[in-house]
Amino acid sequence: MKKTLAAVAVLGAFAGSALAADVTLYGKIDAGLNYTHVSEDGAASTDDFAVKSGQNSGSRFGLKGTEQISEGLTVGFQLENGFSVDDGKMTQGGRLFGRQATVYVKTDFGELAFGRVGGLDSGLGSYDLIADAGVFGTGWGDYTGAMSNFFVGKTDRYDNMITYKSPEFAGLTLVAQASLGEDTSSNTEEGGHLADRYYALGLGADYGALTGALTVSMQDYAGLKDRLADNGIVKDIANDDDGYAVTAFGAYDFGVTKVSLGAQYFDNVAQARGSKTGTWVKDTAGTGGEWEYGDVETGLTGFGVMLGAITPIAGGSLYTSIGYADYEQSKVIVEANDKADYKVYGVGVGYQYPLSKRTYVYTAASYTKTTENEGAATSKDVDTDVTEVMMGLVHNF
């Protein structure tokens, strides 16, 4: 909902210029309950029941605006903050505008943007192309909608990004991105990443009922060892080669249901495994609280697929999804070992019901199974089973 006057009031210092532009104050508040049960071979199972913020979709508020400089020339901006309803803290490492901070110029030849924004294969931000590859997008809990469980090469938000988006031609839109500097915030929070540089090219397609996209991205880890050291982590990195990911999806709306199918191949991506992708994991096994980052030492290579549907039922929408991923270490640290390998299976179902044009309730449940083999001669498969159940309320403004 547009609230031009409210936005001007919030940013009183900019009142003079804001009156000449179209400024929108917007936001989303998501709060609910979450139950997660984790069972791992050889370890005690855990149960967690908590109030969660941003399960269905991250809680946020933002400002965006445009000004028409002349015919065919428009300048615009978007500033978006992420926060947690349960404790009031800012997310994305405590940044004021951690979700997005961009300014852009738009002409008949396309749109050129500068600033922090999600990669085009991240499922995040204004220029993403793959969010619809999974029916849950990147929301719906830590596991139910965790696209990164299956698309391990899924990227994140990046600082210092340059983005070009072409005009639509015959239903096709080209998007190109380059991040000229790594994340400048501490990598101990959501939104942190390890790439020094990020480059991506993608093509989106929109033909009404039929939509899709194809993206190719590269992450340059040349300074990975130094990046870890800057965060107090000393590691002998066995693999700092570039990482690559190719992602594609297609979706068709049959009217009675909308079906989507997505797939990704990734090579040497320095991400944590499964649901821990993109987050730091504190190692408490006798290291005095050293921070580790999944398989950053070796990288991961493999593929993932997702199939899902959104079906209108009883005034709301039913979401169903299944996914599978199969990947292994890109390199091994111990020469006598084979590459560690992982297989992930997941199924999820959710329901969303609107109470008004701006408010809806949701509920969902999922089951995820990860089978891991560390690659040593005596290693056995270790299964981790996760069940997640959630419910919540979202209000948009």
Image (tube, rainbow, N blue to C red):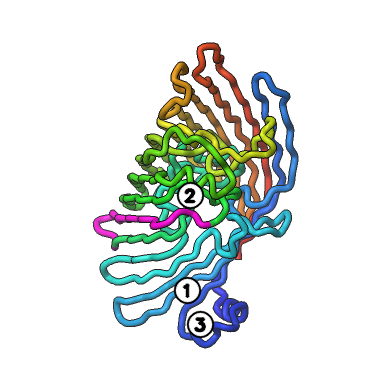
Residue at the image position 46 percent from the left and 29 percent from the top: 325
Q: For the residue labelled by badge 3, is the local secondary structure a helix, a strand or a loop?
A: helix
Query: Which residues fall within the magenta stretch?
Result: 167-184
Residue 156 visible in the current orientation: yes
Residue at the image position 49 percent from the left and 54 percent from the top: 183
Label 2–label 3 contact, CB within 8 A: no
Which percent across, then down, holds residue 264? Answer: 39, 37
Please name the amino acid that badge 2 sits on: Asp
Label 1–label 3 contact, CB within 8 A: yes
Q: In the image, 187: left or right of 335?
A: right
Please name the amino acid that badge 1 sits on: Gly
How crowded pointer 2 is (Cα within 10 Å; few <14, some 14-19, many 20+) is rated as: many
Distance (Cα) linking label 1 and label 3: 8 Å
Q: Nearer the viewer, mark 2 or mark 3?
A: 2
Please name the residue that numbered disc 3 is placed on: 18
Please name the amino acid that badge 3 sits on: Ala
